[in-house]
Amino acid sequence: MLNVDLHCHSTVSDGSLSPAAVAARAKAGGVDVWALTDHDEIGGIAQAREAAHALGLRYVTGVEISVTWARHTIHIVGLNFDEKNEGLIKGLHQTRSGRERRAYEMAEQLEAVGVPDAFEGALKYVGNPDLISRTHFARHIVETGICRDVQEVFSRFLIEGKPGYVPHRWATLEEAVKWIRGAGGIAVVAHPGRYDLNDLELDAFLSEFKRYGGTGVEVVTGSHTVEEFGIFARIARAHGLLASRGSDFHAPGESQTELGSLPPLPPNLTPVWHDWRI
């Protein structure tokens, strides 16, 4: 059985390791097929592919696109696409715009509640200034000693309703799926257990996702519980969606799951990679 990990991040977005270092960690973790899926950015693909090939690791292209749907921020993973596709490149550039302005607003709110030098502190952790994010602020806040870990930072400061949370208008669901499909790839709903959607909302979202051409959902992922593996396996079957698997690894000691350490997909699911030549 292949050990497939199709969701992780590097310094090109909000990970702490370079694409090559993530490839090495995936290989060391026993991964057979790997995709780097940085947020709204494909600038790490060339380095990731080169490192993977040097290690004998089978590689597919990936990206994680931020989407606004019914006032919720939802992430869509694109896999196995042509990274030179102009529509995808322009779309990702479009959705990245506005992050710096949002970051300044976040910094102002955080400093008002006692987090010093928030913007400058976050910037120390940014590999790509165009992609400054909540995770970079979280790492700075942990460094100051205000919180023990990144998870505590998010719960105290960076989720909706807390000081430091600033919403951003991302791509639409239709746009994200269109960019991925236009580049020859497949669109997958990332970590569906993380979204605050009730059953009716989730059903409506997945129906719309399929209508635009989305085909997959992450069933086994780092932030899902064992119970959620079963829940989203049933949902995948009910909606006729392919199943994906990925750790959502960001950094050693910070991520909930290591590369390569996830359990296999539950039975009676069709994997997103079922027809890939890998």
Image (cartoon, rainbow, N blue to C red):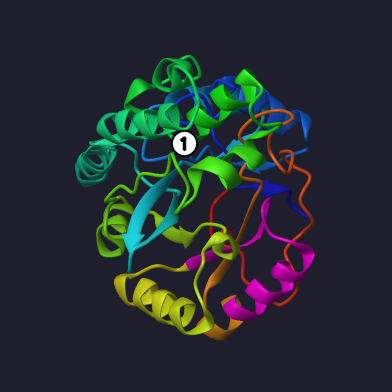
Q: Is residue 104 left or right of residue 23?
A: left
Is 167 in front, or is 274?
167
* Residue shown at 54% from the left, 51% from the top: 277
Which quarter of the rendering shows the N terminus? Answer: bottom right
Q: Secondary structure at mark 1?
A: helix
Residue 265, image x, y percentages: 72, 64
Q: Is residue 24 left or right of residue 85?
A: right
The relative height of residue 270 versus residue 261 in the rendered view (above or below) is below
- Label 1, on which residue? 134
Q: Is residue 150 left or right of residue 174?
A: right
Q: Hey, what amino acid is under mark 1?
A: Arg
Magenta stretch bounds: 216-235
The relative height of residue 137 versus residue 202 in the rendered view (above or below) is above
Q: Specify whether residue 40 is painted magenta.
A: no
* Residue shown at 23% from the left, 45% from the top: 91
The relative height of residue 135 versus residue 220 in the rendered view (above or below) is above
* Residue shown at 50% from the left, 25% from the top: 115
Q: Could one spot residue 7 in this view of the protein? A: no
Q: Quadrant of residue 255?
A: top right
The relative height of residue 24 versus residue 58 in the rendered view (above or below) is above
Residue 256, image x, y percentages: 72, 43
Residue 146, image x, y percentages: 63, 27
